[in-house]
Image (tube, coloured by chain):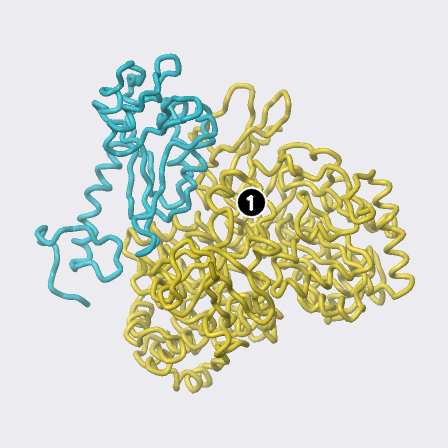
Chain colours: A yellow, B cyan
Amino acid sequence: MSQFLVKEGVKNQIRKGEKLVTTHCCYCGMQCGMHIRVDEKTNKVMGVEPRYDWVLTKGKMCPKGVTAYQTIDHPDRIKRPLIKKNGKFVESSWEEALDLIERKYKEIQGTYGKDALAVYGGVSMTNEKCYLVGKYARVGLGTRYIDYNGRYCMSSAAGGFNKTLGIDRGSSLPWTELEHSDCFFMAGSNTAECHPTSIQWFWKAKDKGAKLIVADPRETATARVADVHLDLLPGTDSALANGIMHLLIKHDYVDHEYVQERCNNFEELKEMTAKFTPEYTSKITGVAAEKIIKAAHIFGKSPRSVVMFARGAEQQTAGVDNVSLYTSMALLRGQIGKFASGVATFTGQGNGQGGREHGQKADLLPGYRKLTDPKAVEYISGVWGIQPEEMPQPGVSAYEMFHLMEAKTIRGLHVICSNPVVSSPNINYVQEQLENLDFLVVNDFFLSETAELADVVLPATTWAEDEGTTTNTEGRIIHIRKVVDPIGESKPDWEIMSLIAERLGKGQHFQYNEPREIFDELRLASKGGKADYYGVTYEKIDEQDGVFWPAPSLDHPGTPSMFKERFATEDGKANLAVCDYRGPAEVQSKQYPLWLTTGRVVFHYLSGNQTRRVDFLKEQCPEPFVEMHPELASQYQIENGERVKLSTPRGDMIAPVKITKAIRKDTMFVPYHWGKKLAVNQLTSPALDPISRMPEFKVCAVKLEKLTK
Amino acid sequence: MNKIMYLEFERCIGCRACQAACRECGDHDAKERNYVEYVDFTESRQTFPMLCMQCKDPACARVCPANAIQITEEGVVLSAMEEKCIGCRNCTFGCPFGIPKFDFETNKMYKCDMCYDRTRHDIAPMCASVCPSDAIRFIDFDEMQQLRRKRTQMNLVEGKKPQEGNKWDYVPEFFGVYTDSQS
């Protein structure tokens, strides 16, 4: 069977002696379609060819996507298991590595109990793998301590959506509808850099006259062309959203019929937003009152609008509030559940959507089932072939696991598909906890900063060496094809987990020959849950350009548009958010008088473990920088390109300055894709949102110092 | 080849996917031949892409003393032929758009060939294929003309001056398409 999928009339370049394998990018939640070029004789990966007929991205790619294939057969790949002996990694056989893991796992669990081992997962891998990480922790290891890097990425969106809409699907509408929208309200999203291929849809809409409102402390590429740029102080989103809703109510832009029929809490919301006059909102957010008013009128008048947000609004101690309030803006306007309108978050990781649905989260089981629900435990236990009593209790969130390592509750850790020593906040503390572990196992295909600390590194495969599915930012389940066989002795994560489970006497629960079998089990495990995949098959995905969940039965086509009739709450009504402005956990002081915010650049992905190794991307952006306004720079007598020191009570770093007027005067921006001395996450705040337990990466008070020559 | 390379600077988001993609073209030796630059980063993030204009009577070819720069029957201006290029760099000085690149190690010029092995089969060049913002497009002549007309039409539809921050702010006042209303 050909692995090359192409629609009629679409022309691709196929070079002599090569074949194309149709798949998707490994990086962000856009999951851009692509074909990978493979030499037919040598079976080597040769390059990339645009997939012009992929419905969402039309062949378009960002520079990460174009060069993604270069990570597959990269010279830095770990090809054999590595065991640390006398502080140095020594290549070993799988047998030896597994022997050691078995011995240490049994030793730790035998002495300190099952929960002394923990699992730290990730969502830059297929649904099949993400699902299995949850099962591996709970059945294979029998530990309650499992969480994943999505805690830093999507958990506030999840919290906010669950609270307001009753279900956490990243987008209430398919993004192919975006070109028909009249207005986008985007908060805390630098989409031109973080999800570049989404831009085609916004620009298409703009060609037809759509309005754009962007809330961001920086004048990003989208903010620059926005009809209104709300240049807010980091951490003040909830005040801004309340302020906009105040005006929507004042100027009667509320869709009363919709709110009456489909929403709770309108009176309470009205009461809460009463004090958020443009003047009051302006005082908190630092955005001129006229801009807030202008934005409210544009948004209020637009017949079809989409409210969108990303980590800027979510990575705050008020992340859940922010998401709930922004979602409520869309609800007040009666937008959710209709054509070309609604609400969406930009998913940062490739499978940030699917990876959070199937039980990698400390308190969730597959299909968004709750670990605290006895019925859910009973059902999943049945699928997994264990007794309900054997199911571990809920654990703690990703960052809180490091506290438990400090307390010696957790003594061994298995990191799968993540690099927490770069991507966590306050990483000097995180590094210390990882160093103090009795035993650390890391699966990765490059030696990440976290892998460097490991006792055993197991060589995983890249996305192109395994089949499976991911769920993109829209909630569309798509098909990732295997392009080449695993490089060296590397193995896909699902096989690694199965091998370890086997060693621990749980092999009967992990009898898989291929990912499809895991997917079939996932389908069953999610059946009847909120994120229901039962009706999704690999064939259906190929036939209909992906399947949107929920798809509860085999004859169900999937659900591109959510909430047409009712919301997923108990009473079917959406809960408008009634939240006051709380402010970030840190305040400016004499010692730390400025604001620091972090984010991505277009050339790098997450902790940079992959993209920092790709020539083009490395050339374009070799090191972090401090972006600041010329007015701020002149107060400190700092010139463009000069290296400066930034510090918070948690750590400091030195980086060159990039001067631009495209940022607030009181805020600096540093991208977070580097580790060790180049890591801005040495400085970031570990304060957590009380509901989502997401750290406040986006706001901290910081000191800026000019270095003496 | 009846297609047009169509650039709209203001759509550019500065991602440089076009440059990464340029390296992927078969004959490109993993070296990009296009440019993305900031207008002025101190002022704003606006960037713009630059590609070879594939001039009808290209200055680069005219000033080449070795006749090394060939033009295909479709009108694509190719890189200097390896065996003819004498490395004088006249082409780089002659080109009004600053397009030809010069490899000082191998002492020869190289430039955009519009991904000739793709475009001669009517497959879009790599840069236009991947450009996420449609700042670079490879489109039919008719579509190009339609796009030109559309710019004016948009303002007629709106019947008003583009507002502050409106990136489609391009129609000069004397076109007379504006009303006075600023609402």
The x and y percentages for residue A388 are 82, 65
Look at the picture and state if A462 lies above or below A398. Answer: above
Closer-to-camera residue (A561/B67): B67
Closer-to-camera residue (A550/A40): A40
Q: Please name the residue shown 52% across and 49% down the image.
A: A604
- Left/right placement of residue A133 relative to residue A58 reads right
The x and y percentages for residue A611 are 55, 45
Closer-to-camera residue (A604/B67): B67
Residue most extreme to the front:
A709
Look at the picture and state if A348 lies above or below B30. Answer: below
- Left/right placement of residue B73 relative to residue A377 reads left
What is the count of numbered marks? 1
Badge 1 element: helix
Closer-to-camera residue (A108/A473): A108
Residue A269 picture quarter:
bottom left
Does residue A166 show up?
no
The x and y percentages for residue B77 are 30, 23
Q: Looking at the figure, which quarter contains the N terminus of chain A?
A: top right
Which residue does the numbered mark 1 point to in the structure image? A611
